Image (spheres, rainbow, N blue to C red):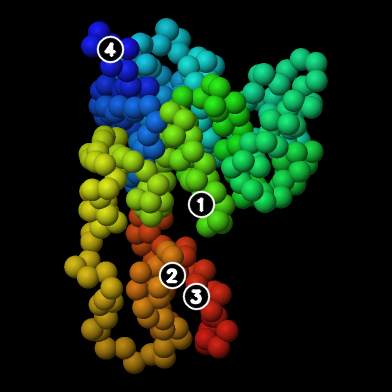
Amino acid sequence: MDSAGQEHPILELTDITKRYGVTKALAGVSMTIHRGEIVGVIGHNGAGKSTLMRVIVGLTKPDTGLIRFNGEAPEPGYSMKAARALGIRIAFQELSLAPSLKVFENVLLNARSSTGWGWRRSSEKQIRAALDEIYPGHGISVRQRVEELSLAQQQMLEVAQAMLDAEARVSLLILDEPTSALSKDQAEDLFRHLKKLRDKGISTLLISHKLHEILGNTDRTVVMRDGQVVSEHPTSELNHDRIVAIMGGVVAENNSKHVEDTTVHDTEVLLSAKNIRNAHLRGAAVTVRAGEIVGLSGLDGQGQQHLLRHLWRNRRGAKGV
């Protein structure tokens, strides 16, 4: 509590900078995270999102700037161990699991409460309970080796391990692209759980390239570009096009209309798809002619992979696909 009796934010970052040679990964980032909120962090690749998260959990030391947890600066030599003691947890985009170890053995890498007599039973119980609560029907045996799991199951395990003892100890959970390998149903299971944690006063920093996940599951959205925070708004005030524009993208005047190429083509059309609509695509269209190399461009998470999967699943009856 401060002198006015108000609760301090869980996390306060002030003018954080980090340079790697001539590259400025963070250029004066300031951010505040309050108790019991889900904050989305979005930006193109290289915007500084992952570097900032590494600073928060003590893996990267900033060049300048101030960090406060619950109103107090951390002790000198702040590290990931110190961050865990403060209740800060992270699930990495690049999995931190030991593939040759079994699921319950990996728990020892993150939950020190499982050490000592009976550690096997304690580890199995903890991780099984976490997986069951977050991802019902996950299909993971806690005695399987991690390398035997699918990529989606490994990602579920990474997230579940970060949440161990959540109700008792975790105050801030950082998830870096936690749904990149998950199905739609598995992602929805995760977001339902995050909202339960929010109701218990646990905050989440959610990094994602998937704009629909940010718009549908966060209380506040922070947009980063070129190592800086360029926008911070309640998510309810934002929409897809506004976020894309803030990130530096170009928004079409009418996304439902596909502008046809007016160039005259006299080659054979091998593939033509128009007005493709599903959970991820909003009126997408593509035409491929004989002898063409067609590129799909856009910020990560803007539907390119979903379009390719749609075309592949519907390839029967299409020439050349």
Q: Position of residue 170 (x, y in %)?
A: 51, 25
Judged from the image, the secondary structure of the residue bearing numbered disc 1 is helix
Q: Quadrant of residue 7?
A: top left
Q: Earlier in the sequence, mark 3 or mark 4?
A: 4
Estimate the spatial distance between the alpha carbons at disc 2 and disc 1, rounded to whole Å. 17 Å
The type of residue carrying mark 1 is Glu
- Which quadrant, please, contains the C terminus? bottom right
Estimate the spatial distance between the alpha carbons at disc 4 and disc 1, rounded to whole Å. 37 Å
The type of residue carrying mark 2 is Asn
- Looking at the image, which residue is at 34% across and 59% down? 298
Q: Is residue 292 visible?
A: yes
Residue that carries the numbered disc 1 in the rendered image: 188
Q: Which mark is residue 278?
A: 2
Q: Position of residue 25 (x, y in %)?
A: 33, 32
The type of residue carrying mark 4 is Gly
Judged from the image, the secondary structure of the residue bearing numbered disc 4 is loop
Estimate the spatial distance between the alpha carbons at disc 4 and disc 2, rounded to whole Å. 49 Å
The type of residue carrying mark 3 is Leu
Question: Which of the two discs, 4 and 1, sits closer to the camera?
Answer: 4
- Residue 1 or 277: which is nearer the viewer? 1
Estimate the spatial distance between the alpha carbons at disc 3 and disc 2, rounded to whole Å. 13 Å
Vertical position of residue 138 compared to residue 305: above or below: above
